[in-house]
Amino acid sequence: MSSYGSQDVLGCGNHHPTGLVGSEFHRQLLDKNEEEEEEALRRKLKYFFMSPCDKYHAKRRKPFKLGLQLLKIIIVTVQLVLFGLSNQMVVTFKEENTAAFKHLFLKGYQDNHPQAVHTQLELYNHISFVIDQYMTLPQISLGRYAYVKGVGVNGSTLSLCQRYYKTGTIDPVNDTFDIDPHVVTDCIGLDPTSDSSAPSNGDFKNFTLQFYKLINVTVDFQLKAINIQTIINNEIPDCYTFAITIVFNNKAHSGKVKIFLQNQASIKECKDPNVSGHAESYVREFFDVVVAIVCLLSLVLCGRSILKGILLQHVGKKNRRFCTFLYLDV
């Protein structure tokens, strides 16, 4: 009776001399059909976990999936590099325009030096300088800018506003003050004209500031520009809209009015782009399509591998005895 068992059939006599677990007696020999099924399942499972090189040596099967994955890594990396270069140009274009606006609209501006005024006359002169520079921008600017109409007060292109407390009486002599913290905003709108001496553009000179209760003075306008340097990277140029706000900050009422310029950029596609003589402008779009196709094929192949693994798992579960010595072959 001790000579009966399945260790010779299963190839694991050294490890399990008493046969498979499940009964007090040794199980009978597996029939030929069961052995063939288990051996076929072993081979499928072993082949499933082979590396691409082992599969090539086993069945001379070319590693198409591995080649596709390497191709995907290369083209996605190239796409990320191009995307980074494109974003770098966007950031650089905004920063350079912001620097240009500071030199154009801030009187006496110097890089890395804070701007401030300390007298009423200086404040009026700086406001006048901003508006004069804005009105003559096409004649003095090195960049190509366009005014944006209808964004200011009463449909104008530029808004000049002052914000001050509704009531503000300060008497340091008697150590008294009377403040109503409600903020009042007073604005006028200005438009550029071909004649800079037109009366409508001189209205701002009659704009009286409420210094004793003034919070800040702001000049708001928008400018349009086109970033044509993207043509170098075979990209269609983008159209930019710069929302510029120049603030004269008097919140502290310390006798020092700080001046700073804020610039918010919005990007959109130009309405009718036309890049003549550059057929390469469509290369980027074609490359993006190739990346999408390769990624889709990679997804299909990976899904097929997962599906095969699930099918093998179900086949293995049906053969309980195969699960007992699965670890010996795999």
Image (cartoon, rainbow, N blue to C red):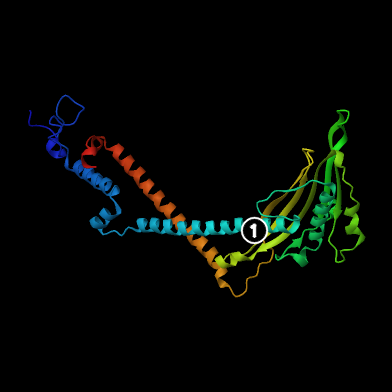
Q: Is residue 162 above or below residue 288?
A: above
Pick out the residue farthest to the bottom.
277
Q: Residue at x 24, y 57 (%)?
A: 57
Q: Where is the N terminus found, in terms of image quarters?
A: top left
> For the view shown, which residue lies furthest in the top direction?
24
Question: Label 1, on which residue?
Answer: 96
Q: Name the quadrant containing residue 191.
A: bottom right
Q: Position of residue 266 (x, y in %)?
A: 68, 54
Give left or right: position of 149 versus 321: right
Q: Position of residue 238 (x, y in %)?
A: 64, 61
Q: Nearer the viewer, residue 268 or 314?
A: 268
On the image, the x and y values in percent for residue 302 come to 40, 50
In which quadrant of the rendered view does residue 70 lie? bottom left
Look at label 1 and name its amino acid. Answer: Glu
The residue under the point 29% across, 51% down is 51
Residue drawn at 73 percent across, 63 percent down:
145
| Rendered view: 250 above or below 102 | above
Q: Residues within 10 Å of mark 1 (few under 14, many from 20)?
A: few
Q: Is label 1 in a helix, a strand or a loop?
A: helix
Q: Quadrant of the C terminus?
A: top left
Residue at (21, 39) in percent of width and height:
328
Q: Is residue 104 visible?
A: yes
Q: On the picture, is 5 further left or further right than 279?
A: left
Q: Nearer the viewer, residue 278 or 197?
A: 197
